[in-house]
Structures are given as C-alpha cells and as structure tokens.
Amino acid sequence: MALAEFASGIIPLSHRKRSVLILLADLSGTLAMTATPKSSSKASGRLGQGVFVLLMALGGLLFLGVVALIPQIGPVLRIDYVASTSMEPNYRIQSFAVVNRAAYGYSAESFDFVRLPLVGRWPDLKPERGDVVLFRLSDPKGGRPVNYIKRVIGVAGDKVELTGDVLTINGVAIPRAVAGKYAYRSDPGQAVQDATMLRETLPGGATFLHIETDGAKAFLANTGVVEVPAGHLFLMGDNRDNSVDSRLSRDKNGAGLVPVTQVVGKIIGSFGGNDR
C-alpha cells in the first residue's frame, strides 16, 4: 500500500488503523531482514576467530611438548651410551640408556653444555634404593667430566656393608636367590664369561637381578661398614664383581660416595646392545 494513498484519505478511516499496523509490520520485517545477516556474520566471525586462537594455542602446546621430549634437545629425555659391562645383565654393553633428567628435579649437572645456576636440586627430589641413575664425575686427570650408570644401593643415613659378596644394609642381610646362569662378552670378539645370576630385594621393596663371576673371592667382595652421609648415595654396578663404584674411593679411581647433585637423571629404559 502506497504512503501517498494513505495520506490522501482515499482509504476509509476504519481501515487506516489496520493499514498502519500492516505498514509498521512490513517496515520492521524489512529492517530485521536487513540487520540479521550482518549480526549473524559478526557472530560467525567471532566464533571462527575463537576457534582459530584455540587451535593455535593447542598446536603451540603440542609443539612444545614434542620438543621437550626430543632426546638431547629437550629438558626431559637424553640418550646415553652404555660403554661397559658393569651393568649386565640389565643394561648390556653397547646399548643405549634412556634417561629422564626431570625425575629428581634439576641440578647444575643436568645438562652437558651449560651449568644451571642451581645449588642442590630443584625441586629437591631424591633417588631411592633400587633406582638406576646416570651421574657425572670430574675426570681426576683434568679432562672432561665422565658419565656413569650405576644402581642406588644406599641412601643418606644407611650403613652399607659387603661380606663375601653378601650385601647388608643397616645390619640386615639383603635377601638373595639364585635366578640362573648368565653368559656375556666384555667386548665383541672376547671370550664368553659365565656368571651366576641372583635376585636381590632391597629395603623398600625394589627388586632386581645382578650377576657374580667370582663370588666371595671377588676383589670388592668385602668392604667393611660404609655410612652414607647426608646428600650422598652409595652406588654399585649390577655386574657385582666387574664394576668400579662406591666400594672404591675417588683417590683409588672409584666413584666414592656420590653427591646427589651429581646425578643427571633416572634410567627408565634401554635399547640395542650386543648379542652376548
């Protein structure tokens, strides 16, 4: 209905009120049709932007998580070469040990090429008996620090002793049971060595296999009582008679009692190694 016709009075008065309502309805419908696509478009745009930002944030977190887990590059994992038989039968020579450097927090020794400005460990988490750890000691000849892999036998306050290759902690002999025979080569091409495999269970419940070749006659089968001071660890190799560890002091080319700050991380697995 034209506005001119309405204004001229051609349309009866009784219909004019109804016409006004119809006209207003038409106008409001026209305005709604004009405004709705714009507001809907804006809402869709805001939703799309929100989804994009969320996806970018998730992608960034995923990327950082992947980088953190890349061995040698990230702050969590590293791979270390097992260069000797001192941890047979559990970590074979020429295998690669997977190290979690975050397991006990971080210390100044956590990374190879940079010393963190830390005193002690942060957070201050301690290795437990039975853990296998990678630790770093300075070279007595003045060379680069050397990494070693050994098992935690005694923690701060423990009194550790070996008598005839039998381990005692705090005056209690550690339960051990023969678990079979084990044969290995100290190096590829070398003669096979036969050993007895035994299972020990430490205080706290940690259980593991170790091997002995000479038993009570071994060079380090007797130690006397060694009390572990605060902030230190008593460590031994699983190849009990062929490991230089905490049973020998540093001045005798051993590891001595190792400060917890020298621990790089916890061994959580291994792969590779020779075929014995």
Image (cartoon, grey):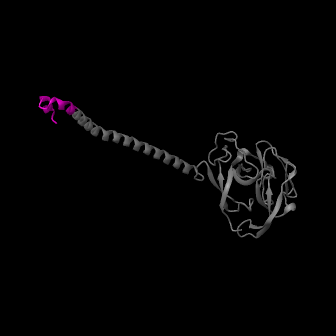
**Could you tell whether 99 is left or right of 182 in the image?**
left
Quadrant for the C terminus, please. bottom right
**Helix, strand or loop: magenta stretch:** helix
Q: Residue at x 21, y 34 (%)?
A: 23
Looking at this view, is 44 or 24 the one in front?
A: 24
Looking at this view, is 71 or 250 the one in front?
A: 71
- Residue 46 % position (x, y): 39, 41
- Residue 78 % position (x, y): 63, 53
Name the quadrant containing residue 157.
top right
Looking at this view, is 2 or 191 the one in front?
A: 2
Q: Residue at x 69, y 68 (%)?
A: 275
Q: Residue at x 37, y 43 (%)?
A: 44
Number of numbered labels in the structure image: 0
* Residue 49 visible (yes or no): yes
**Could you tell whether 268 is left or right of 157 in the image?**
left
Looking at this view, is 248 or 55 the one in front?
A: 55
Q: Is residue 12 magenta?
A: yes
* Residue 237 visible (yes or no): no
Q: Is residue 240 magenta?
A: no
- Residue 165 % position (x, y): 85, 58
**Could you tell whether 106 is left or right of 28 in the image?**
right
129 up-or-down from 117: above or below:
below
**Could you tell whether 51 is left or right of 196 in the image?**
left
- Residue 224 % position (x, y): 88, 51
- Report the magenta residues as a range: 1-20
Quadrant for the N terminus, please. top left
